[in-house]
């Protein structure tokens, strides 16, 4: 019970769930500077906690995604285990197509026949290409949604204008 009150819990391996709240445990990413958690998710499309630039001597390497409890790896005798921390500079971005985007007007129509899923590939004025997974009524609305996501900076590309788009419908599975 004592370990539940501390902010950092010593463990021998990554817990599957937090012992305090039962939520999933994710990796702590160091070298993030002043980056906020939402900026990290939007740019890297990964789950993780931002750890800032300061890496303590015995760093915790996992954290609860809900309550923030942190977990430090130790050897069976209780001494700190040698660990390699995750650094932001070594992370690769996951594809934006892993995120399923929809607009608020589609949410009321999710179960209707007018609901379609599309893969929209956009190319920005800076030559960046990104594929987005979107829900829309038709191809035109899918392109509009993808373009608005790029303009609002929601997909982690530096460009803000879509010069070229291509659309492919994803067949619904029954």
Image (cartoon, rainbow, N blue to C red):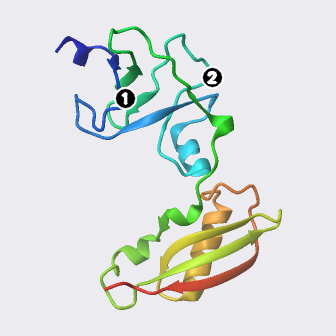
The secondary structure type at the circle numbered 2 is loop
Which residue is denoted by mark 1 in the rendering? 68
Question: Residue at coordinates 62% horizontally, 80% vertically from top-left?
Answer: 143
Question: Residue at coordinates 28% horizontally, 40% vertically from top-left?
Answer: 23
Q: Position of residue 46 (x, y in %)?
A: 52, 48
Question: Residue at coordinates 53% horizontally, 80% vertically from top-left?
Answer: 118
Q: Is residue 62 above or below residue 114?
A: above
Q: Is residue 84 above or below residue 139?
A: above
- Left/right of residue 21 with respect to residue 158 in the rendered view: left
Neighbour tally class for label 1: few under 14, some 14-19, many 20 plus, Cα within 10 Å? some
Q: In this view, does 42 lie above or below 143?
A: above
Q: Position of residue 169 (x, y in %)?
A: 53, 86
Q: Give 39 or 73, whichever is nearer the viewer.
A: 73
Q: Cβ–Cβ below 8 Å for labels 2 and 1?
A: no
Which residue is denoted by mark 2 in the rendering? 53
Point out which mark residue 167 bears: none
- Left/right of residue 95 with respect to residue 117 in the rendered view: right
Asked which quadrant contains residue 127, the reply is bottom right
Q: Where is residue 112 in the image (x, y as percent from the top left)?
A: 32, 87
Q: Give 84 or 144, whichever is nearer the viewer.
A: 84
């Amino acid at each position: 019970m004592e370990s539940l009150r501390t902010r950092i819990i010593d463990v021998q391996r990554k817990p599957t769930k937090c012992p305090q709240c039962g939520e999933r445990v994710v990796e702590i990413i160091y070298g993030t500077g002043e980056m906020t958690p939402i900026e990290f998710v939007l740019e890297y499309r990964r789950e993780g906690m931002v750890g800032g630039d300061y890496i303590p001597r015995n760093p915790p390497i996992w954290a609860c995604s809900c309550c923030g409890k942190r977990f430090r790896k130790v050897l069976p005798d209780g001494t700190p285990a040698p660990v390699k921390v995750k650094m932001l500079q070594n992370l690769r971005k996951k594809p934006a197509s892993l995120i399923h985007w929809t607009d608020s007007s589609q949410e009321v129509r999710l179960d209707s026949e007018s609901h379609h899923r599309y893969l929209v590939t956009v190319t920005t004025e800076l030559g960046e290409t990104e594929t987005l997974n979107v829900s829309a009524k038709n191809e035109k609305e899918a392109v509009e949604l993808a373009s608005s996501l790029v303009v609002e900076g929601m997909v982690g590309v530096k460009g803000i204008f879509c010069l070229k788009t291509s659309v492919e419908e994803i067949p619904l599975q029954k």
